[in-house]
Amino acid sequence: MMGLRTLLLISLFAALEPMLAAGSHRGRSMPGSPVNISREDRGLRRAVLAAAQFFNNQSNDAFLFKPSAVLGAQRQIIKGIRYFVDLEISRTVCRKRDDNNSNLSSCDLQPAGRLQQTIQCHTEVWVISWQNATRTQVFHCRA
C-alpha cells in the first residue's frame, strides 16, 4: 500500500511541476512580474508623456511629436513602478523652437501631407514616486 501512495504522490508532483516552473499561481501573475494594464491607467498616461518628452529631447526634428495611440502596456511593481509600453507617436504642428509648446495637448497633429509622420515605438519608463523621479530607460522606434 505504501508503494501506491508514493507512486501517486510522485505522479501529482510530476503533473504540477510545469505550472510551478512557469510561475503560475492559480491563473494570476507572481508578485513583481509585469501585468497588462488598461490604456486609461493614470500612471500609464504620465509615463507615456514622459517618454514623448524624452523622444522630443533626443530628436533632431523641427516639430514636436506626441503620443497618438497606445498599442499595449504592462506595469511591473519593483522599487517604484516600471511601465512597458508599445505606442505610436505622431508629428504635431508645433515647432520645437516655439516657447509656448510646453503642453503637448495643445499641439494638433500634422494634417495629411508630406509633413505627417507616425512612428511605432517601444519604451520602458520607471516611476519612483517617493523620489518624484521618472526615468525613461528604453526608447526604440521604427518608422
Image (tube, rainbow, N blue to C red):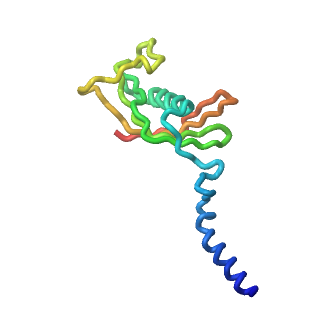
Q: What residue lies at 61% left-to-right and 59% top-to-bottom?
A: 23
Residue 5 location, x and y as percent?
72, 81
| Residue nearest the viewer, comparing 89 with 36 | 36
Q: Residue at x 23, y 26 (%)?
A: 113
Q: How many marks?
A: 0
Q: Looking at the picture, how far across and down is residue 117, in whole percent?
A: 31, 31
Regarding residue 87, the answer to whether it shows in the image is yes
Q: Is residue 130 above or below residue 122?
A: above
The quadrant in which the C terminus is found is: top left
Q: Nearer the viewer, residue 121 or 41?
A: 41
Q: Is residue 138 visible?
A: no
Q: Is residue 52 above or below residue 10?
A: above
Which quadrant of the structure image shows residue 92? top left
> Which residue corresponds to the image point at 52% horizontal and 44% vertical from the top-left?
36
The residue shown at (60%, 49%) is 33
Q: Position of residue 109 (x, y in %)?
A: 34, 23
Foreground of the two, 87 or 57: 87
Would residue 128 be found to the left or right of residue 140 on screen? right
Q: Residue 15 in the image: x percent, y percent?
A: 60, 72
Please identify the residue farthest to the right as the structure is shown.
2
Locate residue 126: give its quadrant. Answer: top right
Q: Residue at the front extreme? A: 1
Residue 122 vs residue 117: left or right? Answer: right
Task: Locate the N terminus and report the quarter of the image it occupies.
Answer: bottom right
- The image quadrant of residue 132 is top right
With 86 as the anchor, is 13 left or right in this view?
right
